[in-house]
Image (cartoon, coloured by chain):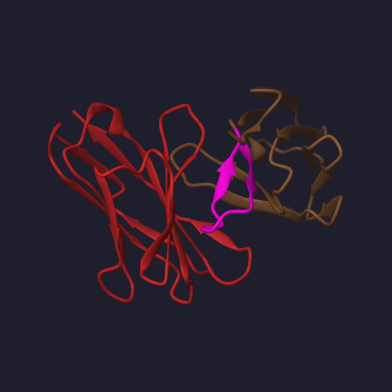
Chain colours: A red, B brown
Amino acid sequence: EPEVTQTPSHQVTQMGQEVILRCVPISNHLYFYWYRQILGQKVEFLVSFYNNEISEKSEIFDDQFSVERPDGSNFTLKIRSTKLEDSAMYFCASRDNSDGYTFGSGTRLTVV
Amino acid sequence: GESVGLHLPTLSVQEGDNSIINCAYSNSASDYFIWYKQESGKGPQFIIDIRSNMDKRQGQRVTVLLNKTVKHLSLQIAATQPGDSAVYFCAERGNNAGNMLTFGGGTRLMVKP
């Protein structure tokens, strides 16, 4: 069964550093998403991406964040100048033209 | 703002019993709902979905019920097994450009052997 692949599975970074979280969506999917989940809390929407541009973003997704689809297969989330409160699980998801949202296993980001 | 919420944070059931997990949503424009299962350290795993033009949908051992009148969604798991132990989230898709999902707060299901 096709999967959404995220790397790394765990990233530790120092406060103030930049991190890039990587995702390989399912190959024929057209819609891409980033969500985050702070420990013990619900999954929160960050951004949706379609046709090489952001289609919607939440209040969380401020100037500290950016997304990119640098080639035909990768979808990245960049977090600049990380803060302690950015520590969370970050999930990538993709969808085709139907309702099928598929989530990756996530990247655990720890900011120290 | 619009939100999706769950009534019970933790549900403990005996193996073999049926489980019912509930969810309340507030966005009357939501047209699609999904139940996800999340095991520790993993991403949300699709269980079952339902469109707003339906009130019931059945899968293997799972049933989702949608009551649009009271904006309520439930997940029924028949003959609950230890492997069903996880956190369950409901999610709704509202009328938005990005078709993103809004998740509820989650219910932890604990299955006692």
Name the quadrant containing residue B51: bottom right
Residue B71 lies in magenta, yes or no? no
Which of the two residues, A60 or B81, is positioned nearer the viewer here? A60
The range drawn in magenta is B88-104
User: For the point 30% across and 32% down, which residue is it?
Assistant: A87
x, y percentage for residue B75? 76, 40
Which of the two residues, A70 or A104, is positioned nearer the viewer here? A70
x, y percentage for residue A19? 19, 47
Name the quadrant containing residue A70: bottom left
Left or right for B67, reference B107: right
Res B21 visible:
yes
Q: Quadrant of the C terminus of chain B?
A: top right
Which of the two residues, A64 or B67, is positioned nearer the viewer here? A64
User: For the point 56% across and 57% down, which residue is it?
Assistant: B99
Q: Quadrant of the N terminus of chain B?
A: top right
Res B16 visible:
no
Left or right for B77, reference A64: right
Which of the two residues, A94 or B16, is positioned nearer the viewer here? A94
Q: Is residue B37 above or below residue A31?
A: above
User: For the point 70% across and 24% down, which residue is it?
Assistant: B11
User: For the point 61% across and 53% down, which residue is it?
Assistant: B46
Q: How many marks?
A: 0
x, y percentage for residue A78? 24, 51
Name the quadrant containing residue A51: bottom left
Residue B90 lies in magenta, yes or no? yes
x, y percentage for residue A2? 50, 69
